[in-house]
């Protein structure tokens, strides 16, 4: 299934399912004796949810989710549904549990057949209960968690199937639907209106449009990353082409896009980019969107892959990603903009996942992503040299796992490095105290190191001297490091590479953590 077909299927599934109960508007609050008597329990270790009935636990088909703050679970929640468990659940709604699995609150939602969603804020102080209403809309109701009472609400689109996406402790991005100010010519029902991406402030209780619909364009929010909201962009050449519908519309085009938060400012040096960039995978180029329309960015586009999980073997393919540098030195149209490294990743949709400042863009040599997308390394160095600085970042390809953050600089390193798992990397570092005076790179003895980003510790594996040197050459199948021990007959022979002798050894990898 290609991307266009897949997105069509998701959109149609959402609209058809919600249309099944459009006549009966969902209603939260007390719903009689049935909901008052219903009690639930959770097993966090197994990720299971149960209905408590007559002293017994009855397993439900719903999944258990966690609201995390700083990596720790603040509470658990689940959506129970009369549609999925008709003989076990008397009333649909959202159930909340403490960290011990005991129920703390149940919010019943009458007439809600499916499509309920809970979106906790990053600090765990608030959450949105997103309730489908009719064929095209949702009510995004904001609750204060400690009081379990509604604070405010805003109407959104039914296409936000998993609810809105929080950008910080007070605001969230959502898809808005409107069929009154502007309608698609020839379209009817829920397809007649347009969708835009908006930002809602739960304190001021005001919305701001981030990506407004036009007669030929509409947008759907797909999540939030560090400073930008991911979007699906749907567009046609002329408004009349909307009349052909969604499923079989040959004129409809779809692409993954993003929009920066207007007031996002990680530092005084930052200025939101004036251009948006997309990856044209077919032609392997970077497309720049700006006030003058679409054009090709004059920069080198690089491609790589990373393992989707720890268990995946190295020859089982992987998740593709692209990276490039956007700076005035690459393209004069970027004059006065902050030089940045852009990283896009995805199996089916190539979404922007990281934007990293590049103080010296000409020194950026490579970008590498760890298994499972947990960490990212930007390799910096001079052209033609194997001496590098490895800038290590915590990367999040999922929401609410913390912002992209610089963790450590590994320097001075030499040659290739190797990801052991999502947190550890094996590399060669110069021993500046054992100068070899070879007159060529690396110029110093090398030692093997393993850096563990989970605990911030750097473990030295070898002990070099002026007589020997050790270089990391790869990973073995049995969980060790391949090392080359490099020796010469005499100290003065370091100047002659022909006199080097390399012996392949195995090095032990320290335990994680």
Image (cartoon, rainbow, N blue to C red):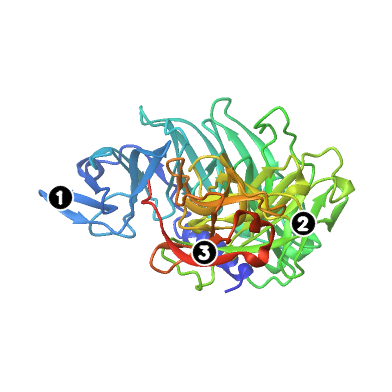
Residue 397 seen by the camera: no
Q: How packed is label 1: few (under 14 Cα within 10 Å), some, or many (20 or more)?
A: few
Residue 474's tag is 3
Residue 191's tag is none
Q: Nearer the viewer, residue 200 or 461?
A: 461
Q: Is residue 293 left or right of residue 147?
A: right
Residue 501 placement (x, y as % from top left): 57, 66
Residue at position x 61%, y 64% in the image: 500
Q: Are marks 2 and 3 in contact (CB under 8 Å)?
A: no
Residue at position x 75%, y 66% in the image: 284
Q: Is residue 50 left or right of residue 128?
A: left
The Cα–Cα distance between marks 1 and 2, rounded to whole angstroms, is 54 Å
The kind of secondary structure element at disc 3 is: strand
The kind of secondary structure element at disc 1 is: strand
Residue 410 placement (x, y as % from top left): 58, 44
The Cα–Cα distance between marks 2 and 3, rounded to whole angstroms, is 52 Å
Q: Nearer the viewer, residue 204 or 185?
A: 204
The Cα–Cα distance between marks 3 and 1, rounded to whole angstroms, is 56 Å
Residue 496 seen by the camera: yes
Residue 53's tag is 1
Q: Nearer the viewer, residue 398 or 409?
A: 409
Residue at position x 67%, y 49% in the image: 437
Residue 193 placement (x, y as % from top left): 66, 53
Extreme residue in the left direction: 55
Q: How packed is label 2: few (under 14 Cα within 10 Å), some, or many (20 or more)?
A: some
Q: Quadrant of the N terminus?
A: bottom right
The kind of secondary structure element at disc 2 is: loop
Q: Quadrant of the C terminus?
A: top left
Q: How packed is label 3: few (under 14 Cα within 10 Å), some, or many (20 or more)?
A: some
In the rendered image, which residue does mark 2 sit on? 216
Q: Are marks 3 and 1 in contact (CB under 8 Å)?
A: no
């Amino acid at each position: 299934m290609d991307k266009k077909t897949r997105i069509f299927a998701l959109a149609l599934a959402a609209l058809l399912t919600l249309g099944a109960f459009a006549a009966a508007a969902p209603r939260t609050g007390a719903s009689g004796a049935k909901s008052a008597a219903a009690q639930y329990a959770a097993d966090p270790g197994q990720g299971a949810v149960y209905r408590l009935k007559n002293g017994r636990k009855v397993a439900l088909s719903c999944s258990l989710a966690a609201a995390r703050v700083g990596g720790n679970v603040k509470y658990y929640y689940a959506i129970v549904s009369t549609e999925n468990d008709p003989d076990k659940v008397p009333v649909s709604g959202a159930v909340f549990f403490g960290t011990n699995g005991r129920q703390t609150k149940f919010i019943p939602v009458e007439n809600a057949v499916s499509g309920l969603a809970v979106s906790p804020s990053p600090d765990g102080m608030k959450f949105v209960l997103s309730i489908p209403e009719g064929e095209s809309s949702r009510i995004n109701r904001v609750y204060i968690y400690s009081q379990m009472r509604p604070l405010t609400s805003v109407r959104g689109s039914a296409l936000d199937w998993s609810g809105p996406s929080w950008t910080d402790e007070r605001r969230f991005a959502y898809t808005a639907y409107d069929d009154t100010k502007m309608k698609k010519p020839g379209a009817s029902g829920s397809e007649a209106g347009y969708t835009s991406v908006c930002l809602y402030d739960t304190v001021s209780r005001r919305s701001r449009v981030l990506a407004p619909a036009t007669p030929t364009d509409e947008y759907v929010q797909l999540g939030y990353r560090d400073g930008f909201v991911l979007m699906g962009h749907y567009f046609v050449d002329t408004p009349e082409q909307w009349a052909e519908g969604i499923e079989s519309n040959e004129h409809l085009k779809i692409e993954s896009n993003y929009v920066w938060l207007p007031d996002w400012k990680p530092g005084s040096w930052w200025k939101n980019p004036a251009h948006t960039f997309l990856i044209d995978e077919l032609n392997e180029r970077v497309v720049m969107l700006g006030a003058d329309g679409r054009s090709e960015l004059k920069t080198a586009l690089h491609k790589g892959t990373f393992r989707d999980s720890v268990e995946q073997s190295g020859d089982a393919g992987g998740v593709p990603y692209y990276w490039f540098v956007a700076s005035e030195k690459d393209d004069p149209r970027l004059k006065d903009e902050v030089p940045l490294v852009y990283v896009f990743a995805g199996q089916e949709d190539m979404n922007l996942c990281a934007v990293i400042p590049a103080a010296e863009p000409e020194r950026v040599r490579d970008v590498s992503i760890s298994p499972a997308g947990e960490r990212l390394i930007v390799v910096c160095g001079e052209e033609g040299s194997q001496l590098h600085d490895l800038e290590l970042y915590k990367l999040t390809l999922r929401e609410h796992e913390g912002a992209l953050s610089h963790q450590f600089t590994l320097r001075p390193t030499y040659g290739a490095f190797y990801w052991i798992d999502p947190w550890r990397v094996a590399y060669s570092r110069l021993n500046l105290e054992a100068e070899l005076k070879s007159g060529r790179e690396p110029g110093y003895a090398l030692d093997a190191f393993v850096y563990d980003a989970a605990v911030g510790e750097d473990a030295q594996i070898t002990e070099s001297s002026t007589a020997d040197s050790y270089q990391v050459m790869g990973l073995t199948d049995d969980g060790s490091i391949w090392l080359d021990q490099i020796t010469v007959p005499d100290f003065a022979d370091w100047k002659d590479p022909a006199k080097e002798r390399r012996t392949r050894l195995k090095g032990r990898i320290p335990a994680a953590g």
